[in-house]
Structure formats: C-alpha cells, structure tokens
Image (cartoon, helix red, strand yellow):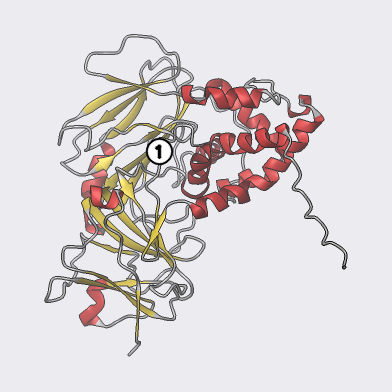
Amino acid sequence: MGAAPPSPTPKPVETREAEIAREAYAFLYPLVIMDVTRRQALQRGGSSLAAPVNTFHHSPAFPRGDFKAVVRPNFDTLYSSAWLDLGNGPVLLSIGDTKNRYYMLPLYDAWTDTFAIPGSETLPAGKTAKFAITGPGWQGILPAGVERIDAPTRFVWIIGRIQTNGVSDYPVVHQIQKALTLAPLDPAKPAPLASDAPVDLTLPPVALVNRLSATEFYETALRLMVDNPPHLVDQAQVARLGLIGLRAARDFRFAGLSSAAQAALADAKTQGPARILRYAGRNGQQRNGWRLNTLSVGTYGADYDQRAAVALVGLGANRPTDSIYPSTSVDRDGKALSGQEHYVVRFKVGELPPARAFWSLTAYTPEGYTEPNAIDRYAVGDRDALSFNPDGSLDLLLQNDDPGADRRANWLPVPRGPFNLSLRIYRPAPSALEGDWPPPAIERTIQK
C-alpha cells in the first residue's frame, strides 16, 4: 500500500492580541480618517475648496468635468459644508428662507455617525430656524427661540446639500446659501486656535491614512478619543481594546504596549485597508447587475465593519432614508461597461426611479472621476427635458459619441474607456429601500 496522504496543515490559532487588534483597526478607522479629512479642509481654509473652522464653505457651482478633489462628485446639489470645533462652547446654526427648496444639513460626529439632520424633512416649508450645537458635557442657558442639538463629540462635520436644478438655478441656490450661517453662541469665545500638525494636501485622506505608521495611527486615535468619546453602545468594544492596552489618553504611547500587542496592531494596520475593502465589496444586495446597500449607513450602532467600510468608500454618506446610490459597472450579460460600446437603460412605464424628491444618473471612470465631454453634461435625471417614448417608457442613452440632435436630450456622455454608473435617488420610496424596485439592467445596443 502507498503512503497515506499527509494531513492538512492546521490553521494557526489566532492569538487574543491579533483578534482584538483586527477589531481595533476597524473600530478606530472612521475616527482617524475623519480627523485627516478635517485637518486637510482646515489647512485649506479660506481657499476655493474650504473655509476656516466654524464657518460654512458654500460651493458656488457644480464641479467641472476634470474635477478631481473628491471622488464621485454629484451634479444634483450645491454643497454648504463646515467643520465645527465645539471646544470653546456651542456654535449657532441659523437657517434662513430656503424658498421651499429640498435641502438637508446632516451633522456627523467624529466617528461618522449622523446625529441630527435639520432640513426640509424636519422643518416646515419656508420656516427659518436657529440651533445651538453643543459639545459633550456643555451646560448653560440658550436664548429664546434657539433649539439645542447635542453633539456627541467635540468635532462635527456639516455636509449641507441643496437641490439645484441646473446651472440656471444657481442664483436661487446662492441666496439660500447666504442664509445659512454659523457663529459662536458666546462672541467672547471664538473657536479654539488651530493646533493641528500640517497634513499633505496632495493626496486624498484614504491614501494619507494608509501611509500612517502603526504608531501614528493608534496614537492619533487614542488621543482623539479624549474629546471625541465613543458612544454608549461602544462600551463593550472599548473594554476589549483596553485588554491590550488601548485606552484614551492625551499622552498615549504606542511604545508603552506589550511587544505582542504592538506586533498584532502593526499587522492589523497593514492588513486592515484590504480587509475593509473586501467587506465593502461584499456589502449590499445585487440585482440586474446593480449593487445597492440599504443597510445601516449613518447610524451604525455596533456594526463596526460596516462603519469602517462606509468611511473608506463613501465618507459622509447619507442615511438610506435620505438618499440611496445603486451602482453598476456591468451590462445585462455581466460584461464590463466600456465607452467603446453603446448602451441603453430603459425604464418601463411606471418604473422610473421611485424618488420623492429627485433622481439622476452619472457615469464615472474606474477611479471615480468624470471625464470632460463636448456638451459639458455629467448627469441626466428627472429635472432634465427628457424625451419619452410613445408608450410612456424612457430610454437613456449611454455612449461616448454624440447620438445626434434628435436623440441628444436623453444622452449621458460616458468616459472613453471603462466606466461605472451611479443612480442617485433622493428621498427614496419604500419600494426602493426594501428592494422591491431594482434599477433595470444595462442593455448593450448595436452601433449603427
């Protein structure tokens, strides 16, 4: 008889340090990438891309076709964004006349959770309002007519979005933006003076976080936790981090951990980005070639892998009840989309995207950017003068070359090479949130 086949090599047993280190990286990643994003923005403060702390930066126009400051820019709303530092006391947010326009001002804490969303969904149409955004532990009396919003962390990001119906609509939106203001509750206590170390402005935050050493990553996170405490639901996870010496402290030193903990945390830092990206790639449901994630976004509870995945691929994402973004990079046959082909997406009668606000479709390169085109069009949607078929259905043409004057109204120019699509649906109906309505598959057509 021949020799028995060798027994399979057993998988090594994961040490406690390694297990907790994996959890620690996913748990802390959103806090660190938010901080890097904040520091970049404030370092640019006063430029065309950002404003100083506790001040709105109002985007005056849609991005240009060659815009590359952020990935997957939208062409539905103009942004009004601000980074708040509540270290010296509350900040007053004033909302003026919004002219019955759809808008939202989600407030994100330092861990990327959404904790308040003033906007047209929560305020009566046309009503002006004042809010005091207060930091952890603040106690005091607010002026009459000012509503309190308790922020769980010292640092807060406001990413305001105002519905914008094309370039001709800019003047109306600019008036709304001017009516959005921020000011200290106590004028004698302006925002704390900046003490952040300089950060590279040439790379996106994801790349900068990836380049941090293990020492830099964990020391940044544990020091941030002092003024930006975890949520109550995080107590069990925080206790587990403490088992290997990870505890919030302004003087936290990575070198003070055991050698086993340092090695495990360094390995988790090295492997973490790819692991989070794999998780993000498996996330959500897939139908007709489109991937849709309506799981916890914006309010994560103890789902730390989901929170890290959203921070990595879609920092500042809206809650699904406010907007969803089905995406695809393949046609009906599962073949990769290419600008060398012609495609159509056909919405049957009664099957347009179920948006209670508005919807649009945008094409991006694999890197997440738009590509300049001859008609300077980067999205098509329900606010465009689309041409419907005689039976009431709607065909959107997806191709790089101009289909001709008679079909140009429904044409979305796509990049010359590989591309992908994002369908933005604002205020999605339950049919979209619950998966009863999937976007139609992308059909490849015969070029004439």
- The residue drawn where x is 64% and y is 20% is 249
At 47% from the left edge and 21% from the top edge, which residue is drawn?
232
The location of residue 118, given as percent across then percent down, is: 28, 32
Q: Residue furthest front?
A: 1
User: How many numbered discs, if any?
Assistant: 1
| In the displayed structure image, the side of residue 275 where residue 255 appears, left or right | right
Residue type at mark 1 is Gly
Q: Name the image quarter holding the C terminus.
A: bottom left
What residue is pinned by disc 1? 298
Name above or below for residue 118 compared with residue 69. Answer: above
Q: Is residue 399 left or right of residue 22?
A: left
Whole-percent x, y for residue 109 in the image: 45, 30
Q: Is residue 31 above or below residue 267?
A: above
Residue at the spot x=31%, y=34% of the render?
117
**Residue 64 appears in the figure:** no
**Local crowd at mark 1 within 10 Å, few (<14), some, or many (≥20)?**
many
Residue 412 percent location from the top left of the image: 32, 70
Disc 1 on helix, strand or loop?
Answer: loop
**In the image, residue 70 lies at what x, y percent?**
47, 52
Splitting the image into 4 quarters, where does residue 260 fall?
A: top right
Picture layout, residue 190 above or below residue 307: above
Identify the residue shown where x is 29% and y is 24%: 131
Q: Is residue 223 visible?
A: yes
Task: Tell me if 257 is positioned left or right of 30 in this view.
Answer: right
